Image: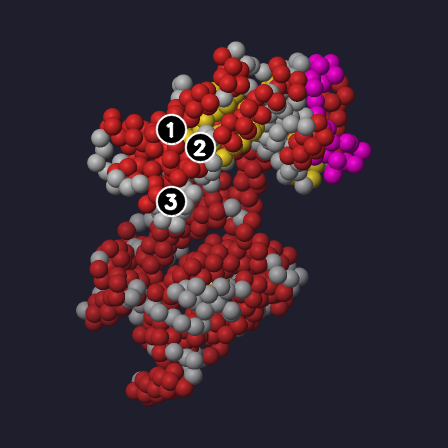
Amino acid sequence: MFLRLDIYYKWLIIMLNLAEKSKFHLKDLLSGTVVFLVALPLCLGIALASGAPIMAGIIAGIVGGIVVGMLSGSHISVAGPAAGLTAVILMQLEQLGGNYAAFLLSVIFAGVLQLLFGVFKLGFFANFVPNNVILGLLAAIGVILILSQIPYLFGITDFSWGSIHEISMAQVDTIAAAIGILSVLVMLAWDASPLKKLLLPSALIAVLLAAILNFVLSTLGLSIQSQNLIQLPNILANPSAVFIFPDWSYLAEPLIYTGAITLAVVASLETLLNLEAADKLDPYKRSSPPNRELWAQGVGNMASGLIGGMPLTSVIVRSSVNANAGSRSKCSSITHGILLLLAVVFFVPLMNMIPLSALAAILIITGFKLTHPRLFKQMLAKGWKQFLPFIITLLAILFTDLLMGILIGLAVSAGFILYGNLHKGVRIYKEKHLHGVVTRIELPSQVTFLNRSSLITALSHVHKHEQLIIDATHCHSIDPDIYDVIQDYQNETAVQRKIDLKLIGFKQHYPEIDDAVLDIDIATADVQRNLSPQQVLTILQEGNQRFVANERLQRDIYRQIRVTADEGQHPIAAVLGCMDSRAPTEMIFDVGIGDLFSLRIAGNVAGQKVLGSLEFACQAKGAKVIVVLGHTDCGAVSSACQLRLSNQKIEDVAGMPHIQYVLGPLMESVNSVHSLMQPRDLSPAFIDQVTRMNVLYNIGYILEHSAVLKQLYEQGQIAIVGAIYDVKTGRVQFLHE
């Protein structure tokens, strides 16, 4: 024993020397040691839970640390036997009659498949597995872990759930059961205490305590039954008892290959998910190549299977411990593998003092974390569309096998997606344009047979004599059967019901169709002439409501440009607004090109040139409404108010010699409000009242200084209204409201 400790000590000195001379940082050595302490009981426990030889878990841990650690592109991820594969291994060993040597062939061929996955860059396929199916998989594994380890926790041998009613206390190893239950309590207490921050995992504490208790009790004559203790062979004394080699006579057995596919899919899925999680834990935020990780895992599984090891994956428990311990590179993973190798070479007698009930306790706690009641509550809170695939995946795995359960879960999730697409995708809008109400059916980017039902339903709700647009401008593809439905509707139903149907966006998919010309947004001479000032005001109000609700009308801008260029302009209103960049009048009122005269000047001040423009808009071009539009938080108004409060003159404003033409007209409104409110500071209320007063002042200025506009107003041919635009909400408040 002293010789072995001396060798171990010398190895540590060599490693420390190498750390100083290479990129192997001391933190990698320390973190690798911490990961080793976590991995050792997990390797033993997972082998126990899987029905594999105990040494198989250690071999897989060594291969995962050294071989995969060297080949992997990840700096944080640590590979080894994983709890997620226990259900797969249990089922496959049961199908093979417990022949572990035959099962090793499945491990090797699973590695070959993973190698091919990496070579052909299939690392993206994990992105297509819904999260609810993955959580169902993990929860099922948790249930399997708990159920499979309960007998070991109580030291019961030759147990089956079918004969549970026949179990008696005589079959229970009371010493093993007491140590197992104590191990559970110790782990729960450790994880709930501040001691958790010491980086010593609760599993290691439980194993050490269990081994010490077993040693103490054995000296008092209270020994645990030998079958309830770890029984690792001594690799130095009997190497042939350690390594189990594949039984190549089973090459013709189909179960080998179906098992390999199951192992490859599940192990690859778990690896990719854990790899993504490990990258999030990396303090240096490095990204790991998934395809390289797949072929590294493939090589690792091939190597593990050839020398009797279990299948392995990237393991999130070890990876998270590795990151939290301060790992800087994959050297920490390699270190943990080397330490596992040294442990089975030099410390087998010590490990054989560990009760199996302590390992069972570790796995039961692990299983409970995977299937915590909180998980079920969270999934149920997300709705039945998330909960049902989750719970069905869980139950399917428990009652069939892992791969079949995943496939069933995927099928259920796909069913929900298909069902959702039957009723979604096609959007229906009721739009009030200048020419009247229009129903617009907007097709999604991919139009398939799944949209057939929703499209037919939407078409059935279009009434006689309505205007209908079927809009395919955002479509990337349209299935022929959907096109047939639309053609039948256009040629038969629309004709019979006198529906004005227009198709747009179809020509790029079906060249024989000419897209319809949309003139519903164009303010023509007839439309302008038939609108009253009150109707124009209603149009502007409704347009602002759409703007606030982010439901602006779909417009054919290119068409509007061409029509207004050829036929001239016939705007329905003129807006005297401020030049503030936050108040674009055409957008605020949701109007198109050719619908609006827009006059924008700081402070929306009406001067002689503005009057000339407004007279041209109403007298010459037939606009029906003049809107004097002020807005909140106006810079010109604030400046004028500040001048009044500080008793400055406009001429005192430096750097802007022409600002008097803006601030001058504003001062009358400022003085009026100031005399009423007597404000002491530049309050929002003061500015808002001046803004409102300025709008009313400019309306009065227009009527007082333009006989043309006053006459049109008195004759009812035009309306002149004031309004305030709120730059925070987008809402326009008309002052007559």
Q: Nearer the viewer, residue 21 or 212?
A: 21
Task: Look at the picture and state if 326 lies above or below 704.
Answer: below
User: Looking at the image, is 401 positioned above or below residue 173?
Assistant: above
- The answer to whether one can see residue 456 in this image is no
Q: Position of residue 168 (x, y in %)?
A: 30, 49
Q: Is residue 71 positioned above or below 556 on the image? A: below
Could you say where residue 584 lies in the image, as x and y percent from the top left? 50, 36
| Range of magenta residues | 494-518
- Residue shown at 36% from the left, 30% from the top: 691
Q: Indicate which disc, 3 or 1, sits on the residue closer to the N terminus.
A: 3
- The answer to whether residue 594 is seen in the rendering is yes
Which residue lies under the disc numbered 2? 604
Q: Earlier in the sequence, mark 1 or mark 2?
A: 2
Q: Residue at x 50, y 74 (%)?
A: 70
Residue carrying label 1: 694
- Identified by mark 1, the residue type is Asn
Using the numbered discs, state the Cα–Cα distance from disc 1 to disc 2 in whole angstroms. 8 Å
Tell me, yes or no, whether the two marked residues, 3 and 1, touch with CB atoms within 8 Å.
no
Which of the labelled discs sits on residue 375, or is there none?
A: 3
Viewer-closest of 524 and 458 = 524
- The residue sitting at 24% across, 55% down in the picture is 192
> What secondary structure prevails in the magenta region?
loop
